[in-house]
Amino acid sequence: MLNLVLFGPPGAGKGTQSEYLIKKYNLVHLSTGDLLRSQITAGTELGLRAKQLMDQGLLVPDEVVIGMIENKLEENQLVAGFIFDGFPRTVPQAVALDQLLSQHDTKITTMIALVVDSEELTRRLLLRGQTSGRPDDQNEELIRRRVKEYNDKTAPVADYYSQQGKFAAIDGIGEIDTIFKEICYQIDKAVER
Ligand code: B4P
């Protein structure tokens, strides 16, 4: 199986690149952000609790997102692989993911990190906020809080994969197609290892 973690701060291009990657490599796309937003739309209790945190630019509790991923792995047993988009966002989530994958006799192939500075992230997210209807994209202070949350809690996840020799960083500024080609190059290299 090919199991990718697509990593980076909010607005780095994870969702954007995932759309191309799932087609090229025939992967199942697991975006915890999308899964949480569908719970919010469905008006579930979990969705209501998550919305309160997401609207403040904060992460939702680890056990909530780990449970969602666990369910999705159960539902998709005979697939070519997964792309994890926006997950893991904390080291405990990364540890839980390794455990879940090993129960399914598989593991992470590599993590690809998209590197984008905070000014460009703010510009992109405010632009997306004009049409996305996402409350967390509509206010500069909130976007800065999301980036801070990323730097405090999520950035250490890169070290976790780096220590396993499964990490590649890519410049996330530039043409979407150029970035996609660089990601594919890094994936193909990791598969050959
Ligand atoms: P997510 O849905 O994961 O949202 P995101 O970080 O904003 O990234 P996204 O993938 O949507 O954006 P992209 O970079 O593609 O998370 C939302 C919230 O959910 C979190 O804040 C948190 O509260 C919660 N959550 C999710 N997962 C969690 C977890 N595991 N644990 C705890 N909480 C969790 O794109 C951004 C914009 O940039 C787009 O408009 C795109 O068009 C543009 N763009 C992309 N590439 C570009 C390029 N190369 N040049 C110019 N623009 C580009």
Image (spheres, grey):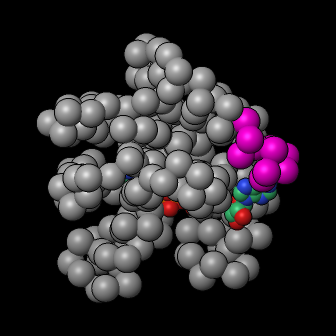
Badge count: 0
Query: Measured from the top left, where is residue 149 in percent x and y?
Result: 50, 45
Give the farthest residue toward the left. Answer: 103
- Quadrant of the rendered structure where residue 127 is? bottom right
- Quadrant of the rendered structure where residue 129 is? bottom right
Q: Is 53 positioned to the left or the right of 143 in the image?
A: left
Q: Which residue is drawn at 48% across and 54% down?
A: 26
Q: Which residue is drawn at 42% across and 38% down?
A: 2
Q: Nearer the viewer, residue 188 or 183?
A: 188
Query: Measured from the top left, where is residue 14 in percent x and y?
Result: 59, 51
Give above or below for 101 relative to 149.
above
Is residue 45 at least partly visible in the picture? yes
Is residue 86 at least partly visible in the picture? no
Query: Measured from the top left, where is residue 188 in percent x and y?
Result: 59, 30
Q: Give the range drawn in magenta.
A: 172-182
Q: Is 156 positioned to the left or the right of 144 in the image?
A: left
Magenta region includes residue 178: yes
Magenta residues: mostly which secondary structure? Answer: helix
Query: Measured from the top left, where is residue 161 in percent x and y?
Result: 44, 23
Q: Is 187 positioned to the left or the right of 87 in the image?
A: right
- Quadrant of the rendered structure where residue 164 is? top left
Q: Which residue is drawn at 38% across and 46% down?
A: 81
- Ligand 1, image quadrant it occupies: bottom right
Magenta region includes residue 104: no
Give above or below for 4 relative to 54.
above
Q: Quick one: quadrant of the N terminus?
A: top left
Give above or below for 60 relative to 156.
below
Give above or below for 193 relative to 92.
above
Q: Is 180 positioned to the left or the right of 134 in the image?
A: right
Q: Nearer the viewer, residue 183 or 53?
A: 183
Q: Nearer the viewer, residue 147 or 166?
A: 166
